[in-house]
Amino acid sequence: MTAPIIVTLTVNGEPVNRAVEPRLTLADFLRDELGLKGTHVGCEHGVCGACTVHLNGATVRGCLTFAVQCEGAEVETVEGGTDSGRLKDLQDEFVARNALQCGYCTPGMLLSAAELLEQNPAPSRDEIREHLSGNYCRCTGYQAIVDAIETTARKRVELER
């Protein structure tokens, strides 16, 4: 058995210092150690996107990232994006357009969409689909999700004018 390793990081703006097993995934760390249940665990192979979080501003799969790899890093979960208000307009459009049904994929979709809109404030529908290609949804058929992201982008661009 391997001895626990102390990891110090920032999660949703709050400093965290914990002893963790070296093989503990970031997704399990967030869920089990910190109680942040918005990070879902689906396939555990990095394919479905349910465990998507932001690590130093970029999306990563929490099931493929070990907690010890996050030493000194900043992690944002859907809870952090919600608390800060950063995801509010996206969340409102997801609700308005019924872009969520069971909700299992929604946290990963929101964080992926937020990353896209930061990189490209006015993406095309094809660019939205491409960026979401690593996030699976078994309920909505994606149309409403793409609509919600496209509408959010359009509204943000109009606000900037």
Image (cartoon, grey):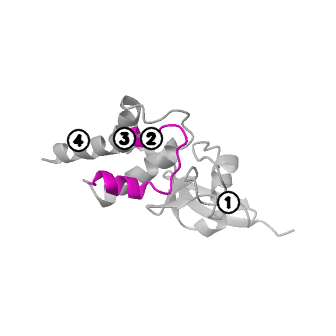
Disc on the earlier residue, 4 or 3: 3
Q: Residues within 10 Å of mark 1 (few under 14, many from 20)?
A: many
Name which residue type carries label 1: Thr
**Residue 119: x, y in percent?**
32, 61
Q: Residues within 10 Å of mark 3 (few under 14, many from 20)?
A: many
Name which residue type carries label 2: Thr
The quarter of the displayed image where residue 154 is located? top left
Residue holding disc 3: 90
Residue holding disc 2: 82
Disc on the earlier residue, 3 or 1: 1
Q: Residue furthest left?
A: 161
Disc on the earlier residue, 4 or 1: 1
**Residue 45: x, y in percent?**
65, 60
Name which residue type carries label 3: Leu
Q: Are marks 2 and 3 in contact (CB under 8 Å)?
A: no
The quarter of the displayed image where residue 47 is located? bottom right
Disc on the earlier residue, 4 or 2: 2
Disc on the earlier residue, 2 or 3: 2
State left or right for residue 32 relative to residue 150: right
Name which residue type carries label 4: Lys
The quarter of the displayed image where residue 35 is located? top right
Q: Nearer the viewer, residue 154 or 83?
A: 154
Q: Are marks 3 and 1 in contact (CB under 8 Å)?
A: no
In this rendering, is residue 59 above or below 102?
below
Residues rendered magenta in the picture: 123-144
Measure the alpha-carbon separation of dots 4 and 3. Answer: 10 Å
Disc on the earlier residue, 2 or 1: 1
State left or right for residue 131 relative to residue 123: right
The residue positioned 70% from the left and 48% from the top of the image is 32
Determine which of the numbered discs, if any, sits on residue 155 in the image: 4
The residue positioned 35% from the left and 40% from the top of the image is 148
